Every structure is written in C-alpha cells, then in structure tokens.
Amino acid sequence: MKIAVIGYCGAGKSTLARALGERYGIPVLHFDRVHWAPGWQERDRAEAHQMVQRFMENPQWVIDGNYTNFEYERRMAEADRIIFLDFPCLACLFRAWKRFFQNRGRTRADMGEGCPEKMDPEFVMWLLWKGRRTQKKKWLAAGLEKHLDKVTVLKSQKEIDRYLEGLLC
C-alpha cells in the first residue's frame, strides 16, 4: 500500500498520515521533516531529494505533503491512494492556531528537528493566501486529474473520521 496525503496547510495532513501509517503498519514520511533543517533553515535540495528517493524505495509508504520538488509525479503515479484534504482557509487557520497553542515552544514529531512550533505573519499569509493562490489550486487540480481513479477528497474533520472508520485493514 502506498498513500500520498496532500492538501492545504493546516488541514491535518500529518495527523492523517500518522493515523494511516499506524492503521496499516507502514512507514510514514513527513515532508516538513525533509524540507526543514534545524532552526527553520531549508535543507539542501539535493540532500532532501535523496532522502525522499530512499524512502520511496520502501515497498509500502505513506507520504505527507505537497512539495512539488520532492518526486511529485512519481509519488502520484506510484500511490495506490491519493487523499486530498480540501479544507476551507478559515478552518485551516483555526486548526493551525490550535496546533500552535498545543505545541508552543516544542518541535512536533512531523516537523524538522530544531524547528519549534511557530505562528508568525508569514505563516498566516501562507495559510490564508499564498498557499491558496490560483496557480497552486490549478497545480493541485492538474495533479489530481491525472489520477482521479485513486483520489479521495475530504473537506472536513467529520469526513476524515468517517474515512478512517470505513477503512478495512
């Protein structure tokens, strides 16, 4: 089983990926752990690319994140399931704000080491605007369109919960 979890920032990609990994007993890769080096520094692209390629050699995986420069076409092609979390922007902002208060001053397990949880104006702009630009929406739609037979779109926490309840192991 290979599962790609994509969607908007703050929608719950990492949480869902972790739950799927546990449910199926397969490894999970969080792209935020690959992209971010300690101190919120972007990791060298070649190093990050190698990390992703090595992980994708696993016979089964769950990968959480959008990052187009991390084997996007290959991920979508190899995935048995693609789950797109298409939450409204205010719901994502609320979820990210809640996550910030739950993890303030700590680094989440799905984040790069040495990158404590933060909520700054740049991140809020990404949540509400930059991460939802027309170009990004078109890119997401185009990537999904090629693989509609294996795409599931979830638009709320209730839909995620129902999806997880309905999975057969």
Image (cartoon, helix red, strand yellow):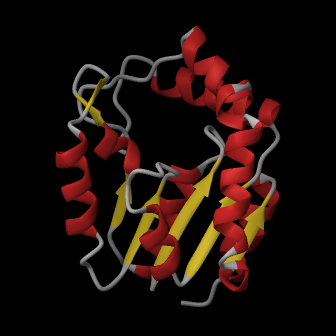
Q: 19 above or below 58? A: above
| Residue occupying image coordinates x 38% and y 62% | 71
Q: In the depicted view, which residue is nearer to us: 157 or 59?
A: 59
| Residue occupying image coordinates x 78% and y 34% | 89
Q: 166 above or below 158? A: below
Residue 148 location, quadrant: bottom right
Side of 99 where 36 appears, left or right: left
* Circle count: 0
Side of 58 where 82 appears, left or right: right
| Residue occupying image coordinates x 39% and y 49% | 31
Residue 70 location, quadrant: bottom left
Side of 60 where 39 appears, left or right: left
Quadrant (top left/top right/bottom left/bottom right) for the N terminus = bottom left
Q: Position of residue 46 (x, y in %)?
A: 19, 47
Q: 35 above or below 70? A: above
Q: Position of residue 12 (x, y in %)?
A: 61, 48
